[in-house]
Image (cartoon, rainbow, N blue to C red):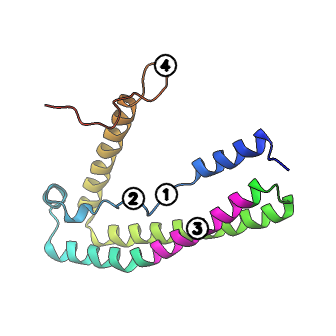
Amino acid sequence: MMPSLCQRMLAVAFALMVSDVVSAQPLQWWKTEPARTELALTSEQSTEIEGIFQDAIVLLRQQKDELDRLEGKLSRLIEMNADEAMVARQIDRVELVRSSLNKTRTLMLLHMRQVLSVDQRVKLTAMHDRWERQQRDNDKQRVAPDGSARPDAGRKRPN
């Protein structure tokens, strides 16, 4: 039986909804000179944060691999028009692993923040806010006035 257009759209929407937490190279801000300078990070703090990151990244990658595997199975179930109870059980498995992945990441970030002084945490939050604004501005520049992606989006322009 051919999947209906609605089922295909559901599968595509679900795939797009999935966040890709670990596959992108994580920004290791504590290693960058601008962040170290702005936060006045000591080498001991940077080393401690690096240790927290290294301890967590192995587990994060394992959890991300498991999430990808379970999401693949869910997509296949949806594509083959599996019965709703089966799909619901697989959704539960996917969301349990996604929750665990998010918890691991959040605890890693908490442990990193605990290494910083109150003043450094305030500065880190300000840095993060600036970065998010820049990302939003960059995203706006990648969209044409009609809402479609601009053909030159993502390409560096010559100076």
Q: Residue at x 46, y 68 (%)?
A: 105
Callout 1 crowding tier (Cα within 10 Å): few <14, some 14–19, many ≥20: few
Check disc 1 and report the residue beneath it: 20
Q: Residue furthest top?
A: 145
Q: Horizontal placement of 69 versus 91: left or right?
A: left
Query: To which quarter of the image does residue 22 belong?
Result: bottom left
Callout 2 touching callout 4 (CB < 8 Å): no
Q: CA distance from mark 1 to mark 2?
A: 7 Å
Q: Horizontal placement of 132 versus 8: left or right?
A: left
What type is the residue that disc 3 sits on? Leu
Q: Residue 134, how many percent across, how many down?
A: 31, 39
Q: CA distance from mark 4 to mark 3?
A: 35 Å
Question: SS class of the residue under badge 4?
Answer: loop
Q: CA distance from mark 3 to mark 2?
A: 15 Å
Q: Residue at x 19, y 57 (%)?
A: 35
Relative to 142, say whether 97 is above or below: below
- The mark that comes first in sequence, 3 or 1, is 1
Callout 1 touching callout 2 (CB < 8 Å): yes
Callout 3 crowding tier (Cα within 10 Å): few <14, some 14–19, many ≥20: many
Residue nearest the observer in this picture, 71 or 101: 71
Check disc 4 and report the residue beneath it: 146
Query: To which quarter of the image does residue 84 belong?
Result: bottom right
Relative to 58, say whether 106 is above or below: above
Check disc 3 and report the residue beneath it: 67
